[in-house]
Amino acid sequence: MRSDLPSINAEHPQNTALLDFLRAQASPPHGPNDYALGEWQLHTHPDLLDRLAQLAPRVPLHAAYGVPVLSYEGIAVAAALGTSTLLVRLPTAPPKLKVGRPDSSLADHGWQEIDAWQGELPSAEGDRRLSGVIRGALANTRDLAS
């Protein structure tokens, strides 16, 4: 299990909503057998951490309160939660994908919830569409950064 990921930029105002949401559910590891990401209990299945990294192999992976986060110039782009949730920074939910409803505190700040596995699609097609979503979230975040 990776524990060497740098922390996301807590000072950047574009990260406030996500970090507030993640901080509210964060906890330190309860024992030596707990999975941890940095100093926090991991709130993502290890397979989903790998999945997030696979979908965007050249995007820096960071940690925030036990959650892996992709970032662009210090701004969070996507985060992996639980066993199957990807939070992505997009103005609207992507079409033709299995989506959920993000917490209202995140939805109000441009975050969408997407199923990380898209099990109703053939594997290669799901990977292609999800990689496209991450590229879209990166483009959206680049716009926010400029």
Image: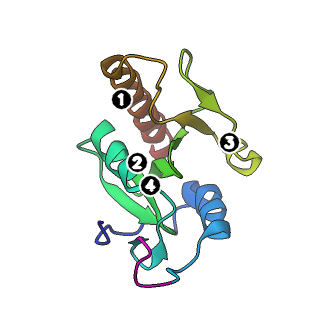
Rendered residue at 61%/26% (across/down): 93
The dot on residue 45 is 4
Q: CA distance from mark 3 to mark 1?
A: 20 Å
Residue where numbered disc 3 is placed = 102
The first of marks 4 and 3 along the sequence is 4
The dot on residue 131 is 1
The amino acid type found where label 2 is placed reads Leu
The magenta span reads 31-35
The amino acid type found where label 1 is placed reads Ser
Q: Please state the horizontal and vertical placement of residue 58, each as a whole percent of the image.
A: 23, 43
Query: Is residue 7 within the magenta segment?
Result: no
Q: Nearer the viewer, mark 4 or mark 3?
A: 4
The dot on residue 48 is 2
Q: Residue 92 versus residue 113: which sits nearer the camera?
A: 113
Q: Please state the horizontal and vertical placement of residue 49, each as a whole percent of the image.
A: 37, 52
The reply to whether residue 88 is visible in this rendering is yes
The main secondary structure of the magenta stretch is loop
Q: Nearer the viewer, mark 3 or mark 2?
A: 2
